[in-house]
Image (tube, rainbow, N blue to C red):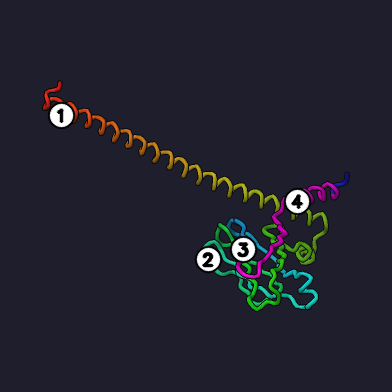
Amino acid sequence: MKLAEVLKVLLVAAMVMTTAKAIWLEMPATGIKCVYEEIHNNVVVLADYAVIGDEEHAQANILPTISVKVTSPFGNNLHHEENVTYGQFAFTTTEAGNYMACFRMNSHAPGSKGVTIGIDWKTGIAAKDWDSIARKEKIKDVELVLMILQDRVQAIHEKLVNLKKREEEMREVSEKTNAEVAWFSILSLSVCILAAAMQVWYLKRFFRKKKLI
């Protein structure tokens, strides 16, 4: 097997692991539906969305419009559109956490039934336009494969580092909770022993006054 073929096989294996999600969201006639993904810092996010009407909308030749709002974990507005049937948003994350995209059908949309929204959500390496990069940098197929693999390895490394950091944070929280539970258990046991000793002392004193012992 030639080197180029080996690299292509590795590229396919790497691309299988890329974060690219095709989502079909069933929208009701009223209300809001949201999708979200937990993403760490400094990651490119690219998403396309489009309204997919049913037979009723196809016969009327009119697609209902939707409103779209994308927010960061701290509530910052990253994308906001009103009265659209399709669109795209792209950004680079500046904070780690859940990034949320919310969709709402407009009240004046024709038809009482809901619609389906198709969402192509890509993050990290999957969000890059490799064809444009190859044309701009004037690189060949093998070089492009190596560049993609390098970026993929870097993305996996960053994800592992992030998971390790979260594991350390969870371990610290767990150890702190265990210590607090241990102190609370000791305090509860001390109070119970003290209460029992007080009861014994009171009963002895009571029985002596009554000359029962």
Tell me the residue at 82%/48% (across/down).
9
> What is the three-letter code of the residue carrying label 1?
Phe
- Mark 1 or mark 4: which is in front? 1
Q: Earlier in the sequence, mark 1 or mark 4?
A: 4
Q: Earlier in the sequence, mark 4 or mark 2?
A: 4
Q: Earlier in the sequence, mark 3 or mark 4?
A: 4
- Mark 3 or mark 2: which is in front? 3
> What is the three-letter code of the residue carrying label 2?
Gly
> What is the three-letter code of the residue carrying label 3?
Cys
* Magenta residue check for 93: no
Mark 1 vs mark 2, CA separation in Å: 65 Å
Instruction: Write down the residue under mark 3.
Output: 34
Circles 3 and 2: CB atoms closer than 8 Å: no
Instruction: Write down the residue under mark 4.
Output: 16
**Magenta-highlighted residues:** 4-33
x, y (%) of residue 102? 61, 66
Looking at the rendered structure, the secondary structure element under dot 4 is helix
Instruction: Write down the residue under mark 2.
Output: 75
Circles 1 and 4: CB atoms closer than 8 Å: no
For residue 206, the mark is 1
